[in-house]
Image (cartoon, coloured by chain):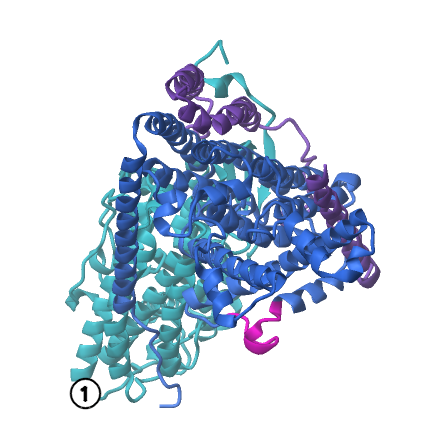
Chain colours: A blue, B cyan, C purple
Amino acid sequence: MQPFIDQIISECEILQGLPLWFSYLIFQLIFCGIIFVFVAVFAMLAGYAERRVAGRIQSRIGPNRVGPQGILQSLADGIKVFLKEDIIPTHADHILFRLAPYFIFIGMFLSFVAIPFSSQWVIADLDIGIFYLLAVESLVVIGIVMSGWASNNKWSLLGGMRSAAQIVSYEVPVALTILLVVMYSGTMSIQGIIMAQGAAPWNWNIFQTPFLFVAFFPLFMGSLAEGNRMPFDMPEAESELVSGYNTEYSGFRFVIFFFAEFSNLYLIGALATVLFFGGWQAGPLPDFVNGLLGIETPLSAAIVKNLVELCVFMFKSLCLVFIVIQLRWTLPRVRVDQLMNICWKYLVPVAFFNLVVMGIWMVVVPEYVTDIVALCMTACGVLLLGYFFYRVAWQLKNTKARLRFNPLS
Amino acid sequence: MTESNQPEKVFKTEEMVLNMGPQHPSTHGVLRFELTTDGEVMTKAVPDIGYLHRGIEKLAETVGYVGFMPYTDRIDYVSAMTANQGYAMAVEKLAGIEVTRRAELLRCTASELNRISSHLVGVGSFGLDMGASTPFVHALRERETINDLLESLCGARLTYNYVRIGGVSHDLPTGFIDKAMVFLNHFEPIVGELNRLLSDNKIFIERLANIGVISKEDAINYGLVGPNLRGSGVKFDVRRDEPYSVYPELDFNIPVGLGKAGTLGDCFDRYYVRVEEMRESAKIVRQCLLKLKDLPEGDIMGKVPRKIKPPKGEVLVKVESSRGEMAYWIVSDGSDNPLRLHCRTGSFTSMGIIEKLSRGMMIADLVALIGSFDIVAPEVDR
Amino acid sequence: MDTYLPILIMFVIAGGFAGAFLLLSYLLGPKKPTDSKLSVYECGLNPVGSARERFSVKYYLVAILFIVFDIEVVFMYPWAVNYKNAIKDGHGAYMIAVMGVFFVMLVLGLFYEWRKGAMNWSNQA
């Protein structure tokens, strides 16, 4: 953020009259506000998108009444929720019960501070950014356990406990995978990790070595588990635990849990994009767009560049978000012991193995071999993607459309 | 932990008593289980039934033979047609009423269509219990077409009240056979589609394989019926072994559990028997429709006396309902009301074995177990 | 410290908004508490006993496992950051060998817990 603010200040004469720290503060406030609004809007739109995608998958329509194509549905739901009674059970632990949503809400937003949306648009480019992300995301667990325990409801308690066990377990493979990426990039700064990759797919981390490719899956599954997303949505498994840790919550407190879930959706996508898919790297695209628009001034050029990179980052992360949404509506839920088994007996050993072999690989294999491998991996990736689309086409061809009888005939 | 190789024996914590139901998403109605759990693992789950008891059997003693027919819909609202048919057959046997062939074929068609729709609900909601919400909606989408068909046949979509003592209430509407054929052609591949979506799913299979295993002997001893019994590998179907209506002249298979996913008689087998049964039912409906096409127009009601007053005596009639053998026992004292009516249903018999199976299960497994029995709560309590 | 300032700002913004929203919802929402509304949901029955009893130990085992493994993974981060530079300097083999010892110990620990059954949740497996 710093260079970008500097650039704005150097262009803008009014700001030069103000003390430097003051303008910094103002700008950081503004950018934090923008991120806040972004997350809020994203959570709403994700809620809407989830329901629309679900509708599409389940051959029904989904919300389409509030606003054009129902896009304001989440907003309407939010307003409705303000008018709901705020119920705190008599036997609940009042302080913890009230405090839990704050933990979740704040933890969620704090993680977004470190997400780099473009080369310059990142609120806090920390040296230990990826570490910070890991740490802050764990705040959510505390909130969940708190809410489960404070409710004094057995189902909530079970949900909270499950959630704690699950999130905490999947933290290990995720941390190990991130460690692998950190090792490969040689930095813990998120921007550094992105910078170490490139715009072209064969420069992305995921296609660098077979081990990084394999490592993507522990990370992705781990993020799903930490975000309580579908095949791993144990804590709120509605068919088992009624509603899990948020059973007793109502009104806006309840919405906060959902809010966190949907903003987490974006974090899942963003984290994977940052670590494996080259982040905001856009290659020559920004220069091309600048040339196309004929922009001369450095500030406008910088803004356009960042915007293009933002679009690239958004595109990648939203693709992943879309996959996550689709997974939710396709897969059944695993059982809680299977969940633990997947983590400790498969993901953790795989992540360990990856780490060791990757370490040896980095020492033994010379650079040019890595490049060749990366190209081959990319080719494989493209083939895999092609096969995937072939399967999708096959399914589409072989899926029966809804049978309709005209009721009047 | 250093002292023993079995940590669960060393670390015994206080057991928690949990109420699952009457208001719980996966008890399929108002049903209660009292769980004693140690964390996720249950020491036992005791079903507590009676929350949906409406005294239907007692009502029969006051509303009369004809008047009781709509109540049979409410015994098993997911598969009302077979409940209708069973009751009608019992009264016909008691009063010695003949049913025309056309009526029998119509009953059979309607029952089998209803069986498909009931199994669609069972299979779909089982998927929902396992966390897969999409198969449920897809299954209900197909059920909707069956509902449309049955609505065109008898005017009702859920509680049909279609079968009458001595026959059925309506003859086929125009175009029904063609529509039903279109539906069957459409539906048979749909079963494969559901399989691709749900039955072949690795997570789904892992959730169900080797869970709630009921041996052949246990299945018989605990009185399981229908798909639950066949899931354990016992090839018993009232339609084939004690045939009624037009079933003897029809060609269909009795799918049994094969232990495809794990052990014979696990949750997956019971689930898969239902999937296969949908195909068989589709076959039966097809045959019935062809027979109906060839049959000249005729009476749909047999010769029924204006006032049904069966002679003194008692009768036990069994039909194969979607949830298995459904038995009506009627005692007549010669008046216009039955002296006693009892209805034995599939969901009720499957409650008995739950406590035995639930020991050492996890909560999620209990959900799978209940779902695999395809319980309809009003059928448990009546 | 400058780079950490936004985190504080975000903390205040998020906390403030959460508080404001909750206050708003408190002001706008109806307040008609009844006994049954305020009681805990237990599938429609009156709750039996408290939920806060001694709880299954398996969850705590997982927590202990997590603490052990996560902290050890955290120990590896400084190593991982410097690994690439060390390879450039030609110390790569030494670095991986030293870390290898640590890896082996960790994996042995994992294996031990596996065999001890600390990861077995159900009695069936």
Q: Is residue B229 visible?
A: no
Q: In x, y percent, where is residue B235? A: 22, 49
Question: Could you tell me which residue is drawn at 29 percent across and 37 percent down?
Answer: A368
The residue that appears at 35% across and 25% down in the rendered structure is: A363
| Rendering coords of residue B121 (x, y %) | 40, 61
Residue B253 position within the rendered picture, expressed as x and y whole percent measured from the top left: 18, 58
The residue that label 1 is drawn on is B296
Judging depth in this view, the residue of B150 and C80 nearest the camera is: C80
* Number of callouts: 1
Rendering quarter of residue A205: top left
Residue B164 position (above or below residue B328): below
Name the main secondary structure of what is drawn in magenta.
Answer: loop
Nearest the eye: B106 or B301: B106
Based on the picture, tell me whether residue B270 belongs to the magenta stretch: no
Residue A40 versus residue B83: which sits nearer the camera?
Answer: A40
Whether residue B180 is visible:
yes
Which range of residues does the magenta coloring cover? A62-73
Residue A221 lies, in percent from the top left, at 44, 42
User: For the view shown, which residue lies furthest in the top direction?
Assistant: B3
The secondary element bearing badge 1 is classed as loop
Residue B56 vertical placement versus B303 (above, below): above
Tell me the kind of residue under disc 1.
Answer: Pro
